[in-house]
Image (cartoon, grey):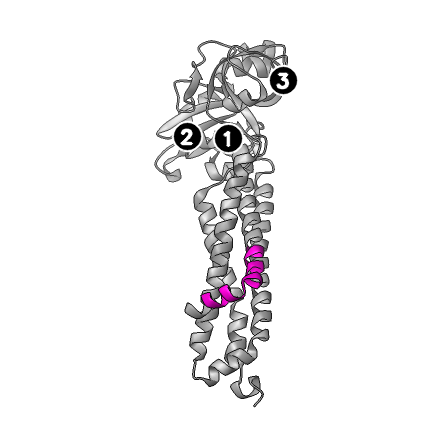
Amino acid sequence: MFLAWNEIKKNKLRFFLIIGVLMLVAYLVFFLSGLATGLANLNREAVDKWNATAIVLAEESDKSLPQSFISTDELDNIEAKDKAILGQISAIATNGDSKQNVSIFGIDKEEFLMPEVSEGEEFSDENEVVASDNLKEEGFKIGDELELSSTDETLMIVGFTESSRCNGAPVLYGELATFHKLKFGEAAEANEDQINGIVVSDDSLAAINTSNDELQITEIENFIDSLPGYTEQSLTLNFMIYFLFGISSVIVAIFLYVLTVQKISMFGVMKAQGISNGYLSVSVIVQTFLLAFIGVVVGFGLTILTGKFLPSAVPVAFDLTTMLIYGAVLVVVAILGAVFSVFTIVKIDPLKAIGG
């Protein structure tokens, strides 16, 4: 520890460059992790609010909610502790000043899918909706009458709920009758038993059963993974983060190896004085830990600071646990990169190193 820290203080510029590179890598990793979390939230926020175990869809729908069509009568064919009906339709809503893609959920407000209202009041009549408060940033407010692209019907915002988005679109919650009017128009009454799915909650997935072979019980995480583009988007960003871990290890390995080669004669003298390979190796590992730790901490601080100044339109959400895990991984891979230098130190012959 003493040797490692003294060398860092003696060669400030050289080690500052290494810290700078590690800081930039950490900053990019943390920012990408925040972007991955933010983009994931855009797709799954509304589903996470359900706190559900599974969703029951038509077998032929291939786990797609909009492509699933079932009857409310299927509630009697499903065994689960809690059950909630769900109809879903997408549209473009405008209040006259702003336009926004929205996802409209038709629900029974007495069931567990009803979100907590953070402002205003619950819907109590047809064509009244509780909206995700993300819409407030786009200029929507309580009392707005919304015209929709897919129908002549208009909706009125009577309340807001905390951020709730599905497939990137803010969610509007309304009565099932509202969904039927938007979906079927004049044929709404003839299709009043039609829904897209039934959301269920129980102690475990195994406790949920259906007697209808034409229905498919899909675990919630599997349903989320099946959302359009969700898995591909997550995998892309995660692979970028994993590549950065590898790049970090290589960068540290190259820097430390070059530094070790430049100090071969010094290590030779130290070995000739009786200093063991173990002591020198530990010194390099400790030195790498200090450099990586400082770089990661500075990168962490810069990421949090950057997040304070980002506009709300940027979908970034920093998860502290994930960032701490990634920070620890960066320190570990940096230490692994120092192994090459350790091997070089062990192989140094004191006589050859000092010109004997």
Asked if residue 88 can be seen in this view, the reply is no
Pick whichever, 164 or 180, lies toward us.
164
Provide the residue designation for mark 1.
57
Question: SS of the residue at dot 3?
Answer: loop
Q: In the displayed structure, would residue 191 be above or below residue 311? A: above
Tags 1 and 2 touching, CB below 8 Å: no
Question: SS of the residue at dot 2?
Answer: strand
How far apart are the two marked residues, 1 and 3, measured between alpha carbons? Answer: 34 Å
User: Quarter of the image holding residue 122?
Assistant: top left
Label 3: how many Cα within 10 Å (few below 14, some 14–19, many 20+): few
Label 2: how many Cα within 10 Å (few below 14, some 14–19, many 20+): many
**What's the residue type where badge 1 is placed?**
Leu
Give coordinates of residue 268: x percent, y percent.
52, 82
Label 1: how many Cα within 10 Å (few below 14, some 14–19, many 20+): many
Residue 15 counted in the magenta span:
yes
Tags 2 and 3 touching, CB below 8 Å: no
Which label is found at residue 200? Answer: 2
Image check: 286 left or right of 154?
left
Residue 170 counted in the magenta span:
no
Q: What span is in magenta? A: 5-22
How far apart are the two marked residues, 1 and 2, measured between alpha carbons? Answer: 11 Å
Which callout, 1 or 2, points at the residue further toward the start of the chain?
Answer: 1
Q: Main secondary structure of the magenta part?
A: helix
Which label is found at residue 98? Answer: 3
Which callout, 2 or 3, points at the residue further toward the start of the chain?
Answer: 3
Pick whichever, 96 or 287, lies toward us.
287
Give coordinates of residue 318: x percent, y percent.
49, 40
**What's the residue type where badge 3 is placed?**
Ser
Q: In front: mark 1 or mark 3?
A: 3
Pick whichever, 214 or 320, lies toward us.
320
How far apart are the two marked residues, 2 and 3, measured between alpha carbons? Answer: 35 Å
